[in-house]
Amino acid sequence: MTAKQDKKLFLFDIDSTLLRAEGATRKAMLRAFYDIFRAKQSIDTISFHGRTDPELFQEAAVMIQGRRLDDAEYAAMTERYIVLLPEELAKSTFRLMPGVTQLLQHLADEKNTILGLETGNLEASAYLKLKRGDIDHYFSFGGFGSDSEDRTELVRIAIERGRRLNSDNISNKKIFLIGDSPNDVIAGRNAGINTLAVGTGLATKEQLLAESPSYYLNDLSDVDEFMKCVGL
Ligand SMILES: [Mg+2]
């Protein structure tokens, strides 16, 4: 009856879904380890794809130091990382994924849409990356790696924040998670919401379809196709 009942919430992953900043995360993380621990060991064998930053920091710590970071070390590492990331983002080959700005603008222009984030990035690093692509102004909330190491948990947090900010009990059927990694699809499914897998990351179409996303698109360049999937 009211417009509120028709609201739809969209939660976007960042890396390889909205944008790609080749190597910036890895380089900033490695430099932070060097600055704090004087550790120079390579972390090239760690897969960054679809992972949360806290997971990556801890996996790198185990590889470099032989143990996880304690709370004080973790705080020091992330603080240093946030200082170094803008430099690495400036140096990186940065690009938005096809159709992203057009799609975000289109969704923002719709009356009953709410845009949020679900990302393994720390909240501060998420906004640094979005700002680099001039798309930060589309987002005001999300679930972040700084909220939880666990992706399903941070998706739940994003949903709660979206509901609270809009004073609206949006049903799970009207919430869509958009991501490029099987981990996104799994987290969205565990949280009980729709999942739209997009083939702009490292995962193959087959790997994504194996997790049974609600929808699959090769990329986000066809706004009409996206709108059809989400019922707009
Ligand atoms: Mg991603």
Image (tube, grey):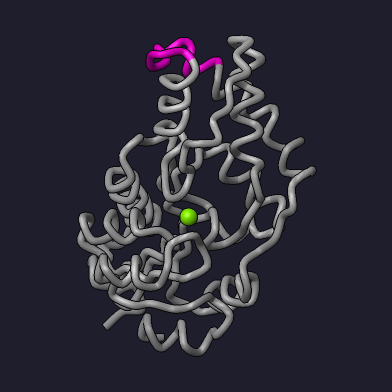
Q: Which of 52 and 49 is in front in this view?
A: 49
Q: Is residue 30 magenta?
A: no
Q: Tell me if residue 63 comes above or below residue 4 in the rendering.
A: above
Screen quadrant of the C terminus: bottom left
The answer to whether residue 102 is left or right of residue 147 is right
Observer-nearest of 189 and 156? 189
Q: Where is residue 184 in the image (x, y as percent from the top left)?
A: 36, 57
Instruction: Residue at the far right: name it.
Output: 91
Q: From what the image shows, is residue 115 above or below residue 15?
A: below
Out of 180 and 117, give the one closest to the viewer.
180
Q: In this view, does 202 lie above or below 210?
A: above
> How many labels were placed on the picture?
0
Q: Give the range drawn in magenta.
A: 65-76
Query: Residue at 45% across / 84% down in the picture?
Result: 227
Q: In this view, does 12 lie to the left or right of 182?
A: right
Q: Where is residue 56 shown, x and y percent of the image?
A: 45, 33
Q: Which residue is drawn at 54% across and 76% down?
A: 220
Q: Hey, which quadrant is residue 103 in on the image? A: bottom right
Quarter occupied by the N terminus:
bottom left
Residue drawn at (57%, 62%) of the image: 18
Q: Give the image quarter of residue 198.
A: bottom left
User: Residue 157 in the image: x percent, y percent?
Assistant: 32, 45
Residue drawn at x 23%, y 55% is 191
Q: Tell me if residue 1 comes above or below residue 31 in the rendering.
A: below
